[in-house]
Amino acid sequence: MTEAEFIAALRRLPLHPAARGLNDDTALLDAGPLVVTTDTLVEGVHFLPTDPAQDVAWKLVATNLSDLAAKGAVPEGILLNYPLSRDAWDRAFLDGLAEILAAHDTRLIGGDTVTLPPGAPRILTVTAFGSDAAAPARSGAKAGDALYVTGTIGDAGAGLAIARGTPGPPELLAAYRRPQPRLAEGRILAPHVHAMMDVSDGLLIDAARMARASGLAVAIDLARIPLSDAYRAVSGDRLAAATAGDDYQLLFAAPAGIATDATRIGVFAPGTGLTLHDAGTPVARPESLGYEHDSSG
Amino acid sequence: MTEAEFIAALRRLPLHPAARGLNDDTALLDAGPLVVTTDTLVEGVHFLPTDPAQDVAWKLVATNLSDLAAKGAVPEGILLNYPLSRDAWDRAFLDGLAEILAAHDTRLIGGDTVTLPPGAPRILTVTAFGSDAAAPARSGAKAGDALYVTGTIGDAGAGLAIARGTPGPPELLAAYRRPQPRLAEGRILAPHVHAMMDVSDGLLIDAARMARASGLAVAIDLARIPLSDAYRAVSGDRLAAATAGDDYQLLFAAPAGIATDATRIGVFAPGTGLTLHDAGTPVARPESLGYEHDSSG
């Protein structure tokens, strides 16, 4: 698509009033305190060249909304930085974008379109704004807090293997390509937890980051890591699940016994570092706790 | 540089309180109504592979601050989406980033770092936030308004030729590599103008966009387009200057006679389209009015 065609298509998406109809160089956002997050996805690094464009759009927005979920924020809108490819990929991307904006009542605020040199991998950025947040930091865990995680872990990692050609069920592939940001749970949890973040790079590495930011040690019971029936059917490897990443579940520290559907998987204590056990039996720390080269402040 | 080294270096830059020390996945911005803008620069498209990394950092931030200037906003801070290259380029980029943040009292709010596949061109995004803005739209010009532009036009276009190897003076090269966002002038002008935008893609194309957004025609006198002595010495071609882009001057519509140092170069009238003359003698519209494939809402 040309830039003009692409922007015309964007104007048919739900626009935030701040967008001024996408007719200006800037947006004007007047929404009180804002939670702001930005994520860049790179073709060949964060998604496969063979991933459908609709799913790339979904995932690009979902990864940002997942960060808002971890702060208990309500999505206000997004900025999109998009490399035009002048082919059907653009239209399919717009379809996926429309789907996820509608699914989470999120509107477009603005963005930028660019043209890439021939053969360059696609690099896409979304910046998301959320309002009305309790905004627990990742650094607020207290000694004695339990570590909880929502949903199940490892499905997206298994889904990535399926996307690369390993046979497996569609629900695992969907977990990789269409992660569901936990916005409703985040809203409910945020006022009651001491620390919260989403699991993007791997359960273990993200738990280690929460412990380090909080100045504490964390011990995780692998036997308690929640697995889906689909994951158990194809693998059931808990250590692989806990280091695979792309789960977009919520990881939080709260007093043990808090009312929640989330699974209690560990405990914070004075000290530093992450230790693992399997229902009490010590387990050696794997060499890699997850995906190291991504994400920042 | 590794991601950890790069983020440690970012923490030595002036951080916005919203950044939470770059220790969280989100920033928390509580600054009242915000002007928001985002620009992506692509190596080989918006900058040359031979442009120094310091200057790329400067330009990446300057293009965004220029959009804030056109709204009369005070820079609040930026988000940076950065592709790590694991070589000296990263350190030089950080030096240029520190320079422009200091020059315009702008702080870092957050961002994302990614790794690119080998050989991929660098793609960098900055999102800038400004506060306290009068925020004139580009669509507010009225019939009878004069069209004004700040500074001189064409210097950056001539500077690009120098960057590509044509001999020429350093001040023109600097105009291309180190554009100066007109923040102080924007602050003064914004409450008094009917429409304002920055000149990024070319004076003529940006003036045509202002006229179209305002539902008016605009007539521009090429003889009045302000040229620097340096530009006159190497070329003096007014049509080339007016279509070259990268000027980052402010273009605004206001009643003729407004007190300003800016140059009056045209007039808005009922109708549509852009017409050119040279001190009264009609001039044919060039095939290209400027750089077409960039920028959006």
Image: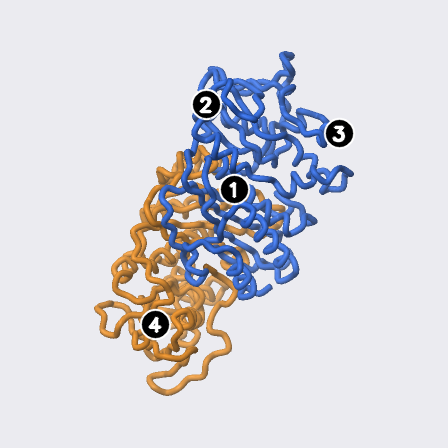
Chain colours: A blue, B orange
Q: Which residue is mark 1?
A: A65
* Marks 4 and 3 belong to one chain: no
Q: Are marks 2 and 3 in contact (CB under 8 Å)?
A: no
Task: In the displayed orientation, state which residue is furthest to the right.
Answer: A167
Q: Neighbour class for label 2 at 10 Å: few (<14), some, many (≥20)?
A: many
Q: CA distance from mark 2 to mark 3?
A: 34 Å
Q: CA distance from mark 4 to mark 1?
A: 48 Å
Look at the picture and state if B236 lies above or below A52.
Answer: below
Q: Which amino acid type corresponds to the residue marked 4 in the rendered image?
A: Leu
Give the mark nearer the N terminus: 2 vs 3: 2
> Which chain letter goes with mark 3?
A
Q: Quadrant of the C terminus of chain B?
A: bottom left
Seen in the image, is A210 located left or right of residue B73? right
Seen in the image, is B249 located left or right of residue A278? left
Q: Which residue is mark 2?
A: A141
Q: CA distance from mark 4 to mark 2?
A: 60 Å
Looking at the image, is mark 1 or mark 2 nearer the viewer? 1
Q: Which amino acid type corresponds to the residue marked 1 in the rendered image?
A: Leu
Decide which of B157, B284 is in the foreground and name it: B284
Dot 3: element: helix
Q: Which amino acid type corresponds to the residue marked 2 in the rendered image?
A: Ala
Q: Are marks 4 and 2 in contact (CB under 8 Å)?
A: no
Examine the rendering and report whether any part of residue A217 can be seen: no
* Residue A23, x across and y down, in percent: 44, 63
Q: Which residue is mark 4?
A: B227
- Residue A233 numbered tag: 3
Looking at the image, is mark 4 or mark 3 nearer the viewer? 3
Task: In the displayed orientation, state which residue is furthest to the bottom.
Answer: B281
Q: Which amino acid type corresponds to the residue marked 3 in the rendered image?
A: Ala
* Residue A73, x across and y down, in percent: 45, 39
